[in-house]
Amino acid sequence: MMDSFIAIDVETANGNRSSICAIGAVKVRGGMVSDSRYALVRPEPDWYARACTRVHGLCDNDTWDAPSFGTVWKQWQPWLEGLPLVAHNAPFDAGCIREACRVYGIEPPEEPFLCTLQAARRNVPKGMCASRSLDSLCEFFGIPLENHHNAMDDAMACAKLAIILL
């Protein structure tokens, strides 16, 4: 059982993986949520696709004066402590973080990137849950998810799901 990790979620402004506009992270120590962080981020490239704004509700007015991903990630490095990273549909979040790191000339995380979606596919029998989406799994397990597609709320839900599944 993995009991210490960082659950992370990103939202993007457009179809470019590097266009992170919000990032939420929840630290779990000894199987308990111990801390969290959230930041709005000026996306790169800096424009919003309507489809993305419809999903998460963020637009240029929210991030025009926000720090870059490079600034936020460098500030968060000590806090991350080299713990394993966990996300729901980790290939998306990991890909976005790696691409944003490339854009800003930062070493991408070396920590393992674990996936609660894959864990749900292994551990939740088909038909037991409406789907394996984050919101469906939260409903199935009784995990509160008040504002789906808010990076902080999704990271918190992912952390609680990971405590159960990982």
Image (cartoon, helix red, strand yellow):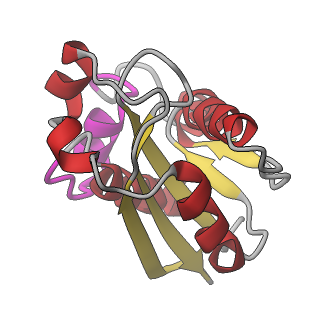
20 vs 151, left or right, is right
Q: Position of residue 149 (x, y in %)?
A: 26, 40
21 vs 45, left or right, is left
Residue at 66%, 66% (x, y): give it.
74
Q: Position of residue 28 (x, y in %)?
A: 55, 75
Displayed quadrant of residue 155 = bottom left
Q: Position of residue 152 (x, y in %)?
A: 33, 58
Residue placed most toward the observer, 9 or 17:
17
Q: Position of residue 7 (x, y in %)?
A: 53, 58
Displayed quadrant of residue 14 = top left
Establish if 138 lies above or below 6: above
81 vs 148, left or right, is right
Magenta-highlighted residues: 130-147
Residue placed most toward the observer, 99 or 5:
99
**How many marks on residues?**
0
Establish if 76 lies above or below 145: below
